[in-house]
Image (cartoon, rainbow, N blue to C red):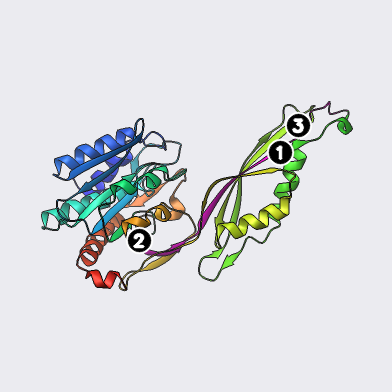
Amino acid sequence: MSVIELAKRLIDIPSVTGQEGELGAYLIDWLERENFRVIPQEFSPGRINIFADAGGPVEVVLCTHLDTVPPILPIDEDDDFIYGRGACDAKGSLAAMLTAGRMLKSEGWVRFGFLFVVGEETDSRGAKAAHPLNPGSRFIIIGEPTGNKLALGHLGVLNLRLSARGRAAHSAFPHLGDSAIDRLLDALQSIRKLDLGEDPILGQSSLNIGLIEGGTAANIISPQARASLLIRCAIPARDILDRIHKAIGGHVALEVLSETDPLDLSHRSGYKTTILPFGTDAPYLKSFGRRYLLGPGSPEDAHTDRECVHKRALAEAVDLYRRLVRELAAEPIEENLR
């Protein structure tokens, strides 16, 4: 099966976050048929991480995530592109890694392994739970849509929830109530006015107010309201949190759902490079070794209703993964410790 046919097969298996089981079962079968040693890690019912090795001491791990964002999209293709949910984020990387691994193994390279994790699109739960699978590797190559360029770094993430409490009353008598929605909107406006920080390489932090909900009816002063925010952090997340706490005071409750700092990643000469505006599982995979981030597809196509990956980029990614695995596996240990 070519990398293109494999990518289409993977895209055709739905794996929205929390529902990765069918894809995991397919991968276990594929890896065992290719004579890789497979170690599944089930950390909650129906959800598994997968580790596999080629039979030798594992110096390099090829890693990506199995889950996608919703909704499921039908697979399609034309002469140049494959379309469908997960095409570039990150089943293109998955197909290229599997194909590269199969080729490396057939060429006698066995000092590598695979790590496939769940939950990257929400809370990185799979990556956080993966440490017991660590084979003592020195390097990990993480697959994400980077345009087949090595990412020099990426922004951190702050996932926040604001909650406001008020007092219900008839809307004809607003002085008898206390609008939670008004409190929430005031807090959101204060946050929108903030300078959230800038890095000379990563650029500016960005804010997305992704969800607002609350109230009971148009003729009732709202007793409760909530908002979900996601901030892409160019500076340490705690610095941004401090600014937000000062801006909102105690008028609304602030809950931190997840928090990661901006990340510097490893790079090598001879590869094109990029900076990513989004977060990945990389912060939670430090124990697997020096981290590299590389994969086919444009990040601007991820999460869209026409998500796609170029067929030529899949073949290019196979060659890049093979090249990088061979280079890293051959690197002297002393070089890695400098």
On screen, residue 4 above or below 238: above
Quadrant location of the C terminus in the rendered image: bottom left
**Residue position marked by numbered label 2 in the rendering:** 291
> Amino acid under label 3?
Ser
Which region of the structure is painted magenta? Answer: 149-172
Please state if 307 lies on the left or on the right of 218 as rendered: left
Labels 1, 3: front one: 1
**Residue position marked by numbered label 3 in the rendering:** 222
Evaluate whether residue 78 shows in this view. no
Q: In which quarter of the image is residue 265?
A: bottom left
Give 287 or 174, whichever is nearer the viewer. Answer: 287
Mark 2 lies on a secondary structure that is strand
Please state if 31 lies on the left or on the right of 72 as rendered: left
Any magenta on residue 75?
Answer: no
Give 6 or 217, whichever is nearer the viewer. Answer: 217
Can you give x and y, in whole percent of width and height, for residue 84 in the image?
A: 38, 42
As measured in the structure, the alpha-carbon distance from the residue carrying label 1 to the one carrying label 3 is: 10 Å
Please, what is the dominant secondary structure of the magenta stretch?
strand
Evaluate whether residue 106 shows in this view. yes
> Amino acid under label 2?
Arg
> Amino acid under label 1?
Ala
Can you give x and y, in whole percent of width and height, for residue 151 in the image?
A: 40, 63
**Residue position marked by numbered label 1 in the rendering:** 164
